[in-house]
Image (cartoon, grey):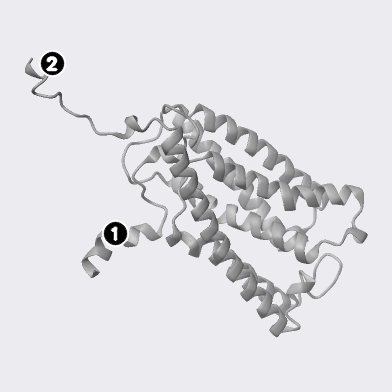
Amino acid sequence: MVKCFRKSFSLSDLWVSSHERLSDFYLTSWQRGDSPVPMLVIRLLLATIMAGIFVWSITTSPTPYWLIYLTNWGLLMVTLLTLSGTVVSLLAVCKQLPDGSALPWYVSIYWLFYNIAITMAIIITALYWILLYNPEQREQEGFWLDLATHGFNSCVAFVEIAMARTPIRLLHIYQPLGVGLWYAAFSGIYYAAGGTDGNGNPFIYEILNWAEPGDASIIVAITAASLIVLYAVLWGVSLCRDRISTSLIRTTSLELPFAPPDRHSPSGMV
């Protein structure tokens, strides 16, 4: 059993540095052939949407407090995901991607952003609409920005999951979980250093108030557990996506090794 485990797992699998098919990072799951153009068009659209939301968010509240909110961390991650994915697709169209299972650094960066951003976007959306949203305190203009940063971000992430072939590995669960725990630690340090939110409150989010460490720790634990469950669900979604698209859509013959002619056939006797 130890031998079997060693054959199926290596330390390099913990990082985003290798994958058997580079084409999984620039082809759609729902195409025949190997043209990178369809995924490039999708990613250009997603990157344009996210860049617009990102600029909208910054220009609406241009203060240093913008950086302390988990919402904006997630918005930045999804924006970087779409931009890095667009770069990968552009390089694929220009035939600038090297062959081999070792991934170029820019593909690895895209994969890292993918693992983190798709999970964080959905978690942030769920936390906001379940725990934080108060319709009585929202103006019309603020509502649309909230919808963009706590709704459209998850839609963009889900489109990337559904349309791309980018793999999700259970071993990579530490990446989004690490960012989530990093933010929890940051919020605690920020509180201990006397930091406040934009309104002068001694916390970033009222539900994550470290003046009550027991309650704050419970929120962190529940969120971390939810993130783990969500990542496992997304892993399952990616497996279903690949199975369905491989059986119904993809041209799998392109991935088969070259077979020599049958020596019993007339062509094999030449």
* Residue 81 can be seen, yes or no: yes
Q: CA distance from mark 2 to mark 1?
A: 40 Å
* Residue 179 can be seen, yes or no: no
Whichever of callouts 2 and 1 sits on the residue coming sooner in the sequence is 1
Check disc 2: other Cα within 10 Å, few if <14, some if 14-19, many if 20+: few
Check disc 1: other Cα within 10 Å, few if <14, some if 14-19, many if 20+: few
Q: Quadrant of residue 214?
A: bottom right
Left or right of 218 on screen, residue 136 = right
The residue sitting at 33% across, 62% down in the picture is 11
Amino acid type assigned to the residue bearing label 2 in the image: Ser
Is residue 96 shown above or below 220?
Answer: above
The residue sitting at 78% across, 49% down in the picture is 147
Q: Which residue is mark 2?
A: 267
Amino acid type assigned to the residue bearing label 1 in the image: Ser
Front residue (pair 251, 105): 251
The residue sitting at 77% across, 69% down in the picture is 205
Q: Which residue is mark 1?
A: 8
Left or right of 139 on screen, residue 213 = left
Screen quadrant of the C terminus: top left
Front residue (pair 75, 157): 157
Q: Position of residue 101 (x, y in %)?
A: 32, 44
Q: Position of residue 191 (x, y in %)?
A: 73, 76
Is residue 38 shown above or below 212?
Answer: above
Q: Quadrant of residue 199?
A: bottom right
